[in-house]
Amino acid sequence: MRNANLVENYPGFPGGISGLNLVNLFEKQLRESGIKVIYEEVTKLDLEDGMFLVETPGRICYSQVVVVASGTKPRRFTDFELPEGVRDKILYEIYPILRVKRKKIAIVGAGDAAFDYALNLGKNNEVVILNRGEAVKCLPILRERARVSPRITYCENTEISRIMSGSQNRMLLECMGPEGISKLYAHFVVFAIGREPQLDFLSEKLRDNAGEMENRGVLYFVGDVKNGAFRQTAIAVGDGIMAAMKIYRRLEEAYK
Ligand SMILES: Cc1cc2nc3c(=O)[nH]c(=O)nc-3n(C[C@H](O)[C@H](O)[C@H](O)COP(=O)(O)OP(=O)(O)OC[C@H]3O[C@@H](n4cnc5c(N)ncnc54)[C@H](O)[C@@H]3O)c2cc1C
C-alpha cells in the first residue's frame, strides 16, 4: 500500500489519503494495541507434528493457528536479461524512490499500478509510460489524470528492446515503437506488469494440506494473497477482521 498514490475508496477518508499516510495510521493503531511486530521475512511455513512451523532467517517458532496475509509479488520482466550495471535502477515498486526529484522515469505497463505510479512519481519527475499494446487497463479516472499531467507522457505500441548504461547515472533505453526504434534516457525503469500471490514460503506439505487446515479453522488466507482481481484495502482489512473473530471464537471454545 506504501506504493499507492491516493487511496480514495477506504471508508473514513473523504477526499482520499496517500497510501503511505494510511500505512502510518495502521501502524500507529497497531502499536497502540500493544501487538508485538517482528520485522523478519518468513522463509518457510511448514507443518510439523500437528503444529505450524514458522521459519525466518533469525528464528523458528511454532504456532497452532496461522493467518497468511502476504499480499502479492510483482511479476518480473523476463523478455531479456538486464545488464548487471543497471539492476539497481530497475524497480518493481516505487516506494524506494518516492522522494526522488527531477529524474526521468520510464514506467512499463498499462494497468492501475502503472498509472498510479506515474501520478505519484510525476509530481516531482518526468515520467513516460510505455504500453506495448493499445489497451489501457486502468480506471478511467487514473488515465484522465495522467493525460492532463504536464509531466507524464504516455506511449502506446512501444516496448523496451534493450537497456544499456548511459551517461550521468542514467540508462539508455532502446524502444520499439510505431515509428521504429527510438532512444530514451531514464534514471529509473519501473515495471508494473502484473502481480501474483506471494506464497513462495509455503512448504509443499503445507500446500497439500492447506484446504484441510482451512476447514479445521487453523489456517487463514486474507487479503490480496487470495483475492485475485479484487485487490482492495477495505476487502483485505475485512478479511483480516473476519479471520480474527473466527480465531477468537475458536480459542474461546477450546479453553472453556
Ligand atoms: C499502486 C497501487 C495502488 C493501489 N491503490 C489502492 C486504492 O486506491 N485503494 C485500495 O483499496 N487499494 C489499493 N491498492 C491495493 C492495496 O494496496 C491492497 O489491496 C492492500 O495493500 C492489500 O493488503 P494485504 O495486507 O492483503 O497485502 P499487502 O499490502 O501486499 O501486504 C502484504 C505484506 O506481507 C509482507 N510479506 C510478504 N511475504 C512475506 C514473508 N514471506 N515474510 C514476511 N512478510 C511478508 C509484505 O512485505 C507486505 O508488507 C493499490 C495497490 C497498488 C500497488
Image: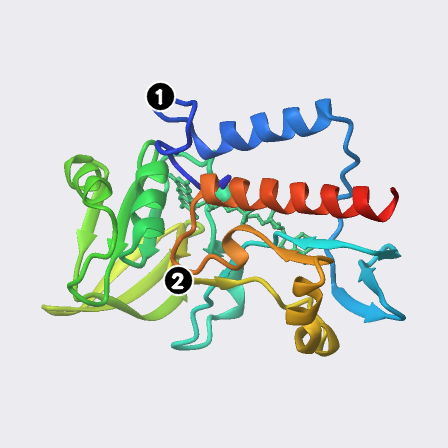
From this view, report whether residue 203 is shown above or below residue 39: below
> Is 95 situated left or right of 7 in this image?
right
Q: Residues within 10 Å of mark 1 (few under 14, many from 20)?
A: few
Looking at numbered disc 2 in the image, what kind of residue is underneath it? Gly
Q: Is mark 1 within 8 Å of ligand 1?
A: no
Percent position (x, y) of residue 215? 66, 64
Give the x, y percent position of residue 237.
54, 40
Report if the beta carbon of the residue with label 2 is closer than 8 angstroms to ligand 1: no
Q: What kind of element bears circle 2?
A: loop
Please tell me which residue is depicted at 45% across the width and 51% down the height of the picture: 169
User: Residue at point 35% right, 21% down?
Assistant: 14
Q: Earlier in the sequence, mark 1 or mark 2?
A: 1
Q: Label 2 belongs to which residue? A: 194
Nearer to the camera, 199 or 5:
199
- Tell which tag, 1 or 2, sits nearer the viewer: 1
Helix, strand or loop status at disc 1 = loop
Residue under label 1: 14
Identity of the residue drawn at 20% across and 39% down:
141
* Type of amino acid under label 1: Pro
